[in-house]
Image (cartoon, rainbow, N blue to C red):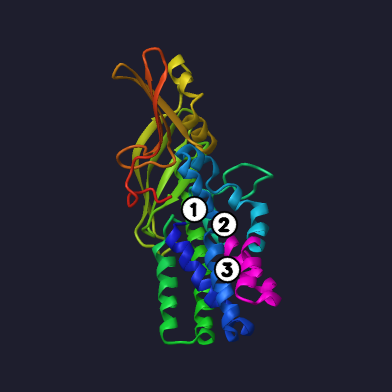
Amino acid sequence: MDTASHLLFGVTLAGAACLHPQIAEHPQLFGAVLAATLIGSHAPDFDTVTRLRSYAAYLRHHRGLTHAVPAWFIWPLVIALPLSSLFHVWESWPIVALWTFIAVMFHVGLDWLNAYGVQAALPFTSKWLHKDVLCLFDPVLFGIHMAVLSSWLWLDRQGASSLFAAAYALTFLYILWRWGTCSRVLQQLRMQFPGALHHQLIPDLSLCRWQYVVETEDCYSTGWVIQASPLSMCTPLRFDFHARYEKSFSLNPIIERTLATDGVRAFHGFAERVVVHAQQWKDGYKVVWNDVRFWHRRGLPFGVEVELDEQLNVVKTKLGWSKKGWEPPYV
């Protein structure tokens, strides 16, 4: 999810930790746990530093090793041990490590529920895992935790802890509800396109709308699935077609020349539904690779553009998004 949400959850996790009397009654231990959950809730995203090198490096490493199985157990030790020493609660370092672990796992779990996905199963598999249940930013979850966080204005730590615990109970119930709703809509999408090879939903900020991508033998179809009300499981769904993208392309010398570029290699390591087209451009050619999963009304905003001269020498490469952050899809 987005950075603001991860940090907010880090604070509210510390509030829920105050259900443990030892944490609630000892300010220094509480301070260590609060620092640990704040850092732990964001630590997997420390890989964003790779963007300083290039977007291709960022695309290769973001949500990779720092989110993977070994990191689940390394982060708690790396974070909890120094904090326990700093806050002079060394004898309670297992408690600090436990809450750090919970923060890290909650971060990885939320990223797994997003459509962008996470390579959480490294080093066993490099496959991108995504359940397509939540947006990058979920206003309902953010609102729940922000509202509960304000309880600290008039309640002490131990008094507010039950509210934080209730917020997490509500969080998991909400995620289960979203998961169930998405599963039902996905089942209807499969019935709508029975002969397709693959069906995918990408959730919208609205609880009543999803983007869809359907893959057949020769093309990808995109559109919206719209539900009249989020509260009724029996509400009929409306399927609005948006666009169709042809899959088949031949690796002509122009397209084939781009496969050796760093940007295209990084793109292919992440993309799942790929289309490509080449055209004459200025004094040469332009080749554009896109991932159809992330479509927008204006086209396909995620991909890599490669400009070549007449001798097929690479002149310029541009990798990344061509949409505003507030525009769908929210991944």
Nearer to me, 102 or 88: 88
Q: Earlier in the sequence, mark 1 or mark 2?
A: 2
Question: Residue flagged by tag 3: what amino acid is it?
Answer: Ala
Residue at x-position 48% and y-position 49%: 115
Q: Is residue 330 above or below residue 285?
A: below
Q: Is residue 193 above or below residue 151?
A: above
Tell me the crowding category of disc 2: few under 14, some 14 to 19, or many 20 or more residues within 10 angstroms, Cα based: many
Q: Mark 1 against mark 2, which lies toward the viewer?
A: 2
Residue 187 position, x and y percent, is: 50, 50
Give the SS element for disc 2. Answer: helix
Tell me the magenta residue range.
78-105
Q: Is residue 83 above or below residue 292?
A: below
Residue at x-position 42% and y-position 37%: 292
Say left or right for 25 vs 261.
Answer: right
Q: Which residue is mark 3?
A: 36
Q: Earlier in the sequence, mark 3 or mark 1?
A: 3
Q: Which residue is mark 1?
A: 114
Q: Which residue is mark 2?
A: 108
Residue 269 position, x and y percent, is: 54, 36
